[in-house]
Image (cartoon, grey):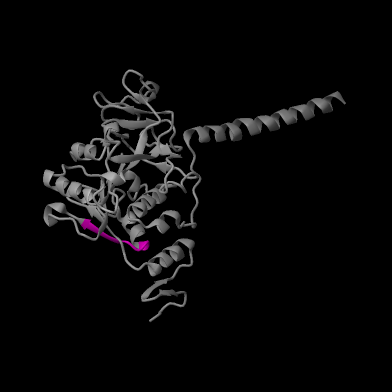
Amino acid sequence: GITRPDTAVLESGKQETRITSASEQELTNALIRVTKDEKKAVYFLAGHAEHALEDRSKEGYSFLNEALERQGYTVRSLSLYESKTIPKNASVLVLGGPQKPVSAEEQLLLADYVRTGGRFMVLLDPGSRAGLDSTLEAWGLQADKRTVLDTQTILGGDLTMPVVNTYGSHEITQDLSQVFTMFPHARPVSFLDSKGNEWVFQPLAKSSPRSWARAGEVGAGGASAGPPPDRTTESRDFNPQKDTQGPLTLAALVVARASAAENARLPAVLLVGDSDFASNAFLDFSGNTDFILHAIAWLAEEKDLVTIAPKDTRFGTLLLTAAQSNALFALQVLALPGFFLLAGFSVWRRRRRL
């Protein structure tokens, strides 16, 4: 029974859910849950030092797990090493930041899953030892071994934390034009043109024109590994002999061409050159939640969830890039005081002449 006076009960057919908060976010998620005839299953692969669903630390994916469950998904961890198979009800598989090698047997299972109409999301950080290059290339995808540096970052952020507000034209990103998405410590991703007859490539997120890709392990100051990180201005500069100028694709989708598909459901793989953006530490940043939830919803063919973006309006944060913060500083500290000083000086001169 109902034990709290502020409880609302929503019913649709045999489905029932209860909420005790009247926020837009809770009400929207409750309506989603109660009107779903079936719960799509999202499996997060485990066993390769990925972000864990149950981990509530800043590196964990527990916040993402809860957000998906609020939208009516069944969310589970899956160890292919133990199961030796992928469940038939897997609407989406997610590989979230593997740091250890994915075995050849596991990669064969993943390739077969995608070939038969599966939907696979791969979040791959720079320096990952997952060993997925050949498998990704079979789908036309490449994960660059370099790290993206970008002078367009939030106030207080460093070059390895690019802030994106340039998105590809796709259902996943159609509502993100007014928000930023941060991909901390990301790598570029690209498409093999030789696979163009099998796969359709769609960039989803790009770094700014002021970004570049740098080889080697990169520290917060933007310096490559080797000697102690150089945090001088020189280490922050683009080097045309070593670096590749942006914009750089940080997230992309490939979908099998209908002529190459073996199943009515077209295979699709979504590759992001970063996994930390969906972690507990960064999920609440501006558009990060929307990006990951929209991406999973599209892969799961939950088209309604791609367009529904419930917001938690209890808190609002003004996010500024370095350029915006410099402009605001100039306006507040230089322009406005200078205007009033000039106006005061003009009044003083006029009175002195009287």
Q: Which residues are magenta?
A: 70-77
Picture quadrant where residue 249 is located: top left
| Outermost residue to the right | 354
Residue at 13% across, 44% down? 103
Q: How many marks?
A: 0
Q: Is residue 184 above or below residue 301?
A: above
| Outermost residue to the top | 241
Q: Position of residue 341 (x, y in %)?
A: 69, 30
Residue at 45% across, 63% down? 28
- The quarter in which the N terminus is drawn is bottom left
- Closer-to-camera residue (123/100): 123
- The quarter in which the C terminus is drawn is top right
- Closer-to-camera residue (93/70): 93
Q: Is residue 230 above or below residue 280?
A: above
Residue 155 in sight = yes
In the image, residue 328 lies in the stretch drawn in magenta: no
Q: Is residue 202 above or below residue 147?
A: below
| Outermost residue to the front | 259
Residue 219 in sight = no
Whether residue 351 sits left or right of residue 165 in the image: it is right
Q: Is residue 303 above or below residue 255?
A: below
Q: Position of residue 152 (x, y in %)?
A: 44, 33
Q: Position of residue 260 (x, y in %)?
A: 26, 44
- Closer-to-camera residue (104/185): 104
Q: Position of residue 262 (x, y in %)?
A: 23, 50
Whether residue 181 sits left or right of residue 189 in the image: it is right
- Closer-to-camera residue (120/77): 120
